[in-house]
Amino acid sequence: MEYCPECGGEMAYDLNMKLYSCRSCGLTLKYHEILEAKRRNIPPREEEEKRQERREYLKWWLSKKEK
C-alpha cells in the first residue's frame, strides 16, 4: 500500500490511467514520482545513516561467509 507524500492518505492505483491517486486529497502521481517524493522527504542525515548501516551489515555478512 502506497501513501500520499502530501497528506499521508492511502493511494489507490487506477489501471486505466496507470496512476496512483490519493483518496484523501486527490493528488495523482506515477509510481516513480511517489518514490522520488519519498526520497526528497528523507533528511540527508538519516539517509546517510541508513547507508552506513547497510555497509556495516554487508561487511559483517561477508565476514561470516569467509570462515
Image (cartoon, rainbow, N blue to C red):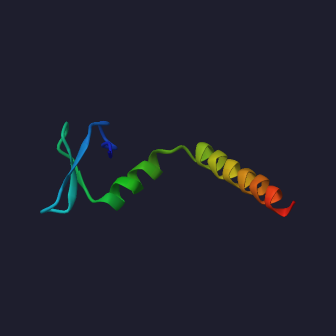
User: How many numbered badges does the structure rendering display?
Assistant: 0
- Residue 4 x %, y %: 30, 43
Drawn side of residue 66 relative to residue 5, left or right: right
> In the image shown, does 30 or 40 lie closer to the viewer?
30
> In the image shown, does 58 or 37 lie closer to the viewer?
58
Drawn side of residue 23 relative to residue 62, left or right: left
Q: Which quadrant of the figure has residue 33?
A: bottom left
- Examine the rendered structure and indicate whether residue 66 appears above or below residue 26: below
Drawn side of residue 34 relative to residue 43, left or right: left
Residue sticking out furthest to the right: 67
> In the image shown, does 64 or 46 lie closer to the viewer?
64
Question: Is the N terminus in the top left, top right, bottom left or bottom right quadrant?
Answer: top left
- Residue 35 x %, y %: 40, 55
> In the image shown, does 10 or 42 lie closer to the viewer?
10
Give the residue displayed 19% in from the left and 36% down from the top. 24
Give the residue displayed 78% in from the left and 52% down from the top. 60
Residue sticking out furthest to the left: 16
Drawn side of residue 22 relative to residue 38, left or right: left
Give the residue displayed 87% in from the left and 60% down from the top. 67
Residue sticking out furthest to the front: 67
